[in-house]
Image: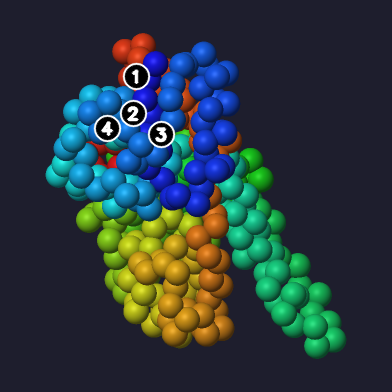
């Protein structure tokens, strides 16, 4: 029998315990689920991990075959020198579907100019129709599993979709760009820009005064990816000047976003409280258990983190 350590938020244990138990039973994997302190570290076969859990030192877990993250982002653990076991990040259907729905909803909101009609009920009649989707250029920065899924969905709606990533990608219906020249091309096209990039040294402040100036005047930015991607001061200045017309932000350098932060009061910023891609326990449990099955069968793990790249 395997020993699986749950090292996530304590408040979520009543939810994850039955979800993981059910998934393991369905997969025919005999296992004991334990909390930190209930079992000796050297007896643990797999760790179900979140940064909100108590385990910070992985050295005692000499038998552990993999650390399986419940979060898509691994920046808070990938640099931990004590973590020598394979690390796998979370990519599951619930998280992917949540990201697709958030991105699609806010792209359509920006594309259709919905804020004007929702917020202005003054009685002024301006019968100006928005362009159709094929006339609108949407750019996705980051073409991993979540970015690619959003790009495909938006392309299926008829938008002119471009995507940029550090390494070349191919996605049907999407003009895929890469490298420094590709980034400049992507930004120049981006009437609506969606950032779904990981948190790495290379992505920190990628959207800064210089790169924001390369975008079409009045462009819209949506960030459901990582807060470090945006230079906050540069974005606020670009919003004040009109270079950027509106920003909808779901992720921030400090969370919860402090009440005094200028984003809250800015008339051209919408703040959402990190809800774009929430891990759903039932679907996440199936991904965790599939990786346990793979580990026991000697098969490659799903979504294994490349330590050098940071994701």
Label 4 to label 1: alpha-carbon separation: 21 Å
Asked which quadrant contains residue 43, the reply is top left
Nearer mark to the viewer, of 1 and 2: 2
Report the side of 223 relative to 62 (left or right). Answer: right
Label 3 to label 1: alpha-carbon separation: 19 Å
Say whether disc 3 or disc 1 marks the residue closer to the N-terminus: 3
Q: Which mark is residue 295?
A: 1
Instruction: Determine crowd level at label 3: few under 14, some 14-19, many 20+ residues with C-alpha closer than 10 A.
Output: some
Residue at 44% in and 63% down:
251
Q: Is residue 213 visible?
A: no
Say whether disc 2 or disc 3 marks the residue closer to the N-terminus: 3
Say whether disc 3 or disc 4 marks the residue closer to the N-terminus: 3
Q: Which mark is residue 40?
A: 4
Labelled pair 2, 3 in contact (Cβ < 8 Å): no
In front here: 73 or 222?
Answer: 73
In front here: 198 or 138?
Answer: 198
Q: Secondary structure at mark 2?
A: strand
Pinpoint residue 220: horizontal percent, then vertical percent: 52, 67
Residue at 55% in and 43% down:
14
């Amino acid at each position: 029998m395997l020993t699986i350590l749950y090292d996530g938020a304590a408040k979520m244990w009543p939810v994850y315990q039955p979800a993981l138990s059910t998934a393991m039973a369905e997969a025919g994997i005999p296992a004991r689920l334990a909390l930190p302190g209930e079992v000796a570290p050297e007896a643990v076969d797999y760790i179900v991990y979140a940064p909100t859990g108590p385990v910070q030192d992985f050295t005692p877990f000499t038998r552990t075959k993999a650390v399986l993250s419940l979060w898509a982002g691994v920046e808070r653990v990938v640099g931990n020198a004590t973590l020598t076991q394979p690390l796998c990040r979370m990519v599951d259907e619930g998280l992917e579907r949540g990201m697709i729905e958030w991105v699609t909803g806010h792209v359509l909101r920006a594309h259709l100019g919905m804020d004007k009609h929702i917020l202005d009920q003054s009685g002024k009649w301006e019968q100006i129709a928005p362009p159709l989707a094929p006339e609108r250029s949407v750019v996705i920065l980051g073409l991993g599993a979540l970015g690619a899924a959003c790009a495909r969905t938006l392309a299926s709606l008829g938008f002119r979709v471009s995507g940029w990533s550090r390494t070349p990608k191919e996605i049907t219906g999407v003009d895929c760009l890469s490298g420094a020249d590709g980034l400049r091309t992507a930004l120049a096209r981006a009437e609506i820009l969606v950032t779904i990039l990981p948190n790495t040294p290379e992505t920190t402040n990628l959207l800064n005064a210089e790169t924001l100036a390369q975008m079409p005047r009045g462009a819209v930015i949506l960030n459901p990816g990582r807060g470090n991607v945006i230079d906050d001061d540069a974005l606020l200045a670009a919003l004040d000047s009109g270079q950027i017309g509106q920003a909808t932000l779901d992720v921030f350098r400090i969370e919860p976003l402090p009440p005094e932060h200028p984003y809250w009061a800015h008339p051209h910023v919408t703040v959402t409280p990190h809800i774009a891609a929430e891990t759903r326990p039932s679907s996440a449990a199936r991904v965790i258990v599939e990786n346990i099955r793979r580990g026991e069968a000697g098969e490659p793990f799903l979504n294994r983190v490349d330590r050098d790249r940071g994701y």
